[in-house]
Amino acid sequence: MLALLVAQNIAFYIIAALMVVGAIRVVTTKNVMHAALWLVLVLSGAAAQYILLAAEFVAITQVLVYLGAIIVLFLFGIMLTRAKTGNDDDLDNKKSAKFIGAGIGVLLLGLMSYSLIDGFKDTEFGNLMVQRTAEVSDSIFSTYLLPFEVLSVLLLAALIGAIVIARRD
Amino acid sequence: MFNMIDKVWIIPALMAASFLVILFFGKRWGTRATAGIGIAAVSICLLLSVIVAGNWISRVNHPPTGAALAADVIAANGLIPQTGETIGQEVNAATKDSGETMTTESHSASTTEANATEGHGTEATASENGGEHESVPPVVRTVTWFQIGGMQFEMGTLVDGLAAMMLITVCIISLLVHIYSTEYLHGDVRFTHYYAFLSLFTASMLFYVLSSNTLQMLMGWELVGVCSFGLIGHWWEEKKNTDAALKAFLTNRVGDIGLILGVIITFFAAGGTSFNVLHINEYALSHSANTTLLLVGALCLFGGVTSKSGQFPLHTWLPDAMAGPTPVSALIHAATMVVAGVYLIARLYGVFFSGLAIGSSTFHYVAFIGGFTTIIGGLLAFVQTDLKKVLAYSTISQLGYMVMALGVGAWTAGVFHLFTHAFFKACLFLGAGSVSHACHHTFDMREMGGLRKKMPITHATFLIATLALAGIFPLAGFWSKDEILAGAANGQENAYTIMLIFGLITAFLTAAYMGRAYWLTFWGEYRGHAKPHESPKVITVPLIILAGCAVVFGFTNFPGNFFGIKLPSGVTTRFEHFVEPTFAFPPLQHAEFTPWLAVVSTILAATGLFIAYQYYEKNRGPHGLTSRNKVAHAGYTFLENKYYLDDLYTGVIAGSTKGPIARAANWFNQNILDGVINGIGFGARKIAGVVYVFGDQLIIDGAVNGSGRGSEGAGQLLRKIQTGKVQQYASILFAGAVVLAGVLVFVV
Amino acid sequence: MFLNQFLLLAAILFCIGVYGVLARKNGVLVLMSIELILNAVNINLVAFGAYWHANDMANVSGQVFALFVIAVAAAEVGVGLALVLLIYRNRQSIDIDDVDMLKG
């Protein structure tokens, strides 16, 4: 049991480190294409964390939707807007804006870390059980049926909206 | 005869179906088919209504007993019926809280009935049931409409004598109007639209009269209002018509607020569990009722009545509503919709009875408003040159009569007048329509005259209806008007002398202004330019039928003792016997036929007619008085301007933002204050000059300009933040979030 | 494992995302940063979901909401990229600080 816990912790910290690095690279790299690829790292790291949390269905959906669909969309977006291949120095706002953004980000992080550590201290996960896909689907189609239906309408609206916005006429 | 009384919902549903069919297919199928659908639907409805009335009559004659009675009582109270042997216990349990009161009430009711029986000696059922007048519960059938937080809202039908009577009235007049309109609106651009609205109106009116709860009544009430709006503005190309429609709609909104409040108040007063009409009535009549709450509720409800039934001071929309097609005026603004308010009082009589303490004093709010309305309506009818407007004011006056009757406790008389009035007033309106149809669509009586030879049928029917309205024996108006007067004279505990005087004056006025309209229209020389001719059969046949109704229907409530003529009890006071509720209804005393009153009122009416004849036909009397005598002229102007009520409303509604108040103030200034003001004016001007320089220019203008500059400066400053760059906004957003979160984490 | 491990990771990702949204000029990169923020939220949701699931086996609300967020994110990216495309087509550039016609 202890061995398992240790293994879990080690896995978590390795993946977390990769994710943080990846995320920082996404927002600092000078190459748009690289940013997309670093994003892939962050997203797949998130999927791995979900597996650590025994949430198999979300992990699989993360891979399918984010890595399979959204990243491809981003690549299309990059392609269609004819971004420069190779380094581009004109991706960021001017220095002052960057400082403000960094300041806000650090402040926010400090605030959140303080309240999280203060609030949850040493709360441990209990006995982590696999959350089965069957349970998830049961929950969606009974308790959360109405939000689910609303979501389908939202997707339809987004679909139509995207077409209307992007088409040439 | 099969039992229709359980399935009355079919009747409004049928009309609603007709509405939908006309709406969707009317244009495609053409005008003939449109009219055909409407007429067929109303005919079936009329047939079914007659069956319902028949069912009700047999129910009164053979009242249910035992388990059937218990089930009906439960249904009538809006409770869920149970099956099996528990039913008796259920009744006891269900009516436990109002049980005592119910028994005493029915007891006292039966005592009154017994007293009345001794007086009349004519109570048919009373003799059948051994002197005991059975309480016949209405037939209530409900389904659950929706449920909120354990509260069930029900929707259902309630059939009793009153509802059955209204069904028949609405169906007959609607059918005749449907037929009449095929000719009257021949070739109209919006023929389909018109018939669709007609169907919708009939459906909503039937829905309204069959409602089993106040919530549903409110729905029906609003629906008929919408139809009225649509039909008044039928010819919306003319601004006058749309204005009239808007005025009708808005004026009614004012009253509707009262109605909604009244519905809510009565709902909570009666325990907050049910909107059921009978439940509310029963509560209102029980000894534990909160009379203060009921008083407020009844006054609010009366606000709705005031606007819908054209009572003073919200009657001003009704004459303007004559901008609609004439058949519509006959159906909606004379016979059916406008009596919705009267029906509301009749239906919720328990609330009005105990809330406003009918019968315990010589003065009564509802009766007074009714009486006042009948007089002002009657007076206004004199100065109108438009035939339809005369009839409109006459309608207001007669509605006032009904309300007055209900106010003095003469329930049957009021409802009976509603019934008879519907027919002869519809006949008058349709007759006026026929006249205008012949005279190039004018309603101006100055361009008519001498039509009796050219339009004999229209003339004859119009004459009958006029006499009926004037209350000449033996036509329908005589009986109902007389009952109201007798009710006012006898009262409940005290006589209502003021109301009686109001009623007698109006009897005279009615005869006089109707005589004026009649002679101006049908006698003398023709003064118009068209070539009048008798209308086709489609128009005259409905007129003949309605005139027939105006002759016959008065006898439905033939008094028990008419100048010593005593008919067998099976044919007298049938209307009262079948229509007046015996369930959840206050104990009322019934006024007997009063010979001296009948004689006086008939003499008054005859005098009125005679004076009108002398004045308008023989040209005798003080003609030109209004132009010679200042007082008379002032009175005439006052009437011609409809007591200046319209000016008042326009001023108040438009408020200080628009001109009217300024104009009203100006008028006030010019006519009244001028003399006083002129003297003071000079001195005031001097002071004003000083005030202008120092007060106005320096202080006020300074403040105004200063605040203007201040806001401009602030705007210039803030505009710098408005860069249009979305990321700067985002920074502000997130910075704000940080600050807020910091406050929440560290401070709170 | 502590619950806080995941929550702090999510907080870090969130703040990096916020920085990206504020500091980047390129429209596509801003959208990517938004994806980072959404993922941080998802990690939170799943972590709390797992925590509650350990106590109550029938409760999988965390996962369900994470799924909803993924679906909304997909819609957002679709519309967002369509907008970026439209901007590019009109101005031959996707620098969002050029889009400031609403300035006061």
Image (tube, rainbow, N blue to C red):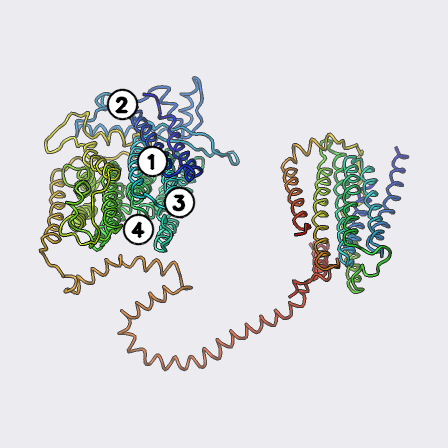
Decide: few, some or many residues near mark 3? Use Cα within 10 Å; few <14, some 14-19, many ≥20. Answer: some
Task: Give the CA separation, mark 1 to mark 2.
Answer: 26 Å
Say which residue label 3 marks: B226
What's under tag 1, amino acid-wise? Leu
- Callout 4: helix, strand or loop? loop
Disc 3 and disc 2 in contact, CB within 8 angstroms: no
- Callout 3: helix, strand or loop? helix
Q: Position of residue B527 (x, y in %)?
A: 17, 54
- Callout 2: helix, strand or loop? helix
Decide: few, some or many residues near mark 2? Use Cα within 10 Å; few <14, some 14-19, many ≥20. Answer: some
Residue nearest the viewer, comparing B39 with B155: B39
| Among the two numbered marks 4 and 2 on one chain, the one whose residue lies closer to the N terminus | 2
Decide: few, some or many residues near mark 1? Use Cα within 10 Å; few <14, some 14-19, many ≥20. Answer: many
- Name the image quarter holding residue B492: top left
What's under tag 2, amino acid-wise? Asn
Q: Is residue A62 above or below residue C93?
A: above
Residue shown at 51% from the left, 73% from the top = B704
